[in-house]
Image (spheres, helix red, strand yellow):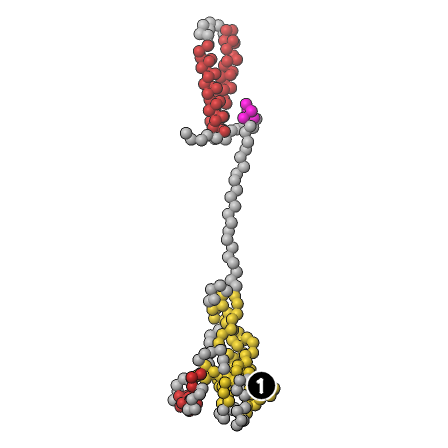
């Protein structure tokens, strides 16, 4: 059986009481009414039927139109339930900067040097003179950092200049000075009166590598180790 609420049970009870009251009046009415005066003895019964009928009509409505607590039914108004819907707010995208293997190399206006035959070279970097040999640290430029999305590590394409980079001097000869970088395929080459540039690591020990490189440059080919500009501003 379907579960009934308090209001439905109240209507059923009142209806049953009304039916019993009406049945009582029908079965016990005197049928020998002969005068108008005799009808007064049924007035109370008639009034009770009218009251009962009005109550039934009121309960049959969807919303009762009375405010009195009839028969101590303790009618309590229901409060509308409020359902709170939580809206998920989008979390702001977080970014971070990481170092790349690319460098912004110092130009000859910043770095100048002269060579010695004893395996040493004298560098002048931003007005400061420094004699170096193989194994020493040498400032050759600034690191380039790229912006990535935290979590996915996806690059946004934006770059900026980072801190100064110092590399280990790998070789000092009568023509060039080679400095190590974080790029496993490239080193940085310094030559007299020219800007520093990238150089292929596997060609560093080849005595004919510079001649091969010069021939390639004169023929219009790509120069090994030359830094290719990357998109993105700083």
Q: Which residue is drawn at the image coordinates 53% and 67% (left, top)?
A: 96
Q: Which residue is mark 1?
A: 125
Instruction: Tell me the element at label 1.
Output: strand
Q: Quadrant of residue 214?
A: bottom left
Give the x, y percent position of residue 53: 48, 20
User: Relative to 194, does residue 157 appear above or below in the rendering?
Assistant: above
Q: Which residue is drawn at the image coordinates 49% and 87% (left, top)?
A: 171
Question: Foreground residue, 103 or 136?
Answer: 136
Residue 106 seen in the figure = no
Residue found at the far right of this picture: 128
Q: Is residue 162 a member of the stretch shown in magenta?
A: no
Give the x, y percent position of residue 2: 42, 31
Q: Is residue 70 a member of the stretch shown in magenta?
A: yes
Give the x, y percent position of residue 229: 46, 78
Q: Which residue is drawn at the image coordinates 51% and 49% (left, top)?
A: 86
Residue 179 seen in the figure = yes
Residue numbers of the magenta segment? 69-73
């Amino acid at each position: 059986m379907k579960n009934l609420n308090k209001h439905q049970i109240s209507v059923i009870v009142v209806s049953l009481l009304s039916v019993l009251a009406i049945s009582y009046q029908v079965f016990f009415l005197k049928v020998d009414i002969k005068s108008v005066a005799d009808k007064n003895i049924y007035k109370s019964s008639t009034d009770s039927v009218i009251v009962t009928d009005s109550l039934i009509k009121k309960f049959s409505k969807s919303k009762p139109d009375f405010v009195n607590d009839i028969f101590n039914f303790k009618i309590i108004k229901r409060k509308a339930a409020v359902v709170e819907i939580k809206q998920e707010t989008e979390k702001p995208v977080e970014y971070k900067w990481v170092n790349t293997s690319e460098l912004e190399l110092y130009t000859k206006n910043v770095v100048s040097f002269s060579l010695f035959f004893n395996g040493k070279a004298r560098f002048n970097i931003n007005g400061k003179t420094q004699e170096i040999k193989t194994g020493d640290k040498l400032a050759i430029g600034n690191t380039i950092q790229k912006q990535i999305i935290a979590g996915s590590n996806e690059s946004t394409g934006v770059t900026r200049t980072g801190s100064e980079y110092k590399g280990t001097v790998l070789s000092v000869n009568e023509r060039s000075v080679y400095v190590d970088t974080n790029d496993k395929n490239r080193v940085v080459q310094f030559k007299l009166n020219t800007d520093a540039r990238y150089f292929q690591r596997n060609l560093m020990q080849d005595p004919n590598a510079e001649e091969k490189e010069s021939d390639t440059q004169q023929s219009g080919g790509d120069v090994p180790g030359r830094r290719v500009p990357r998109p993105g501003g700083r």
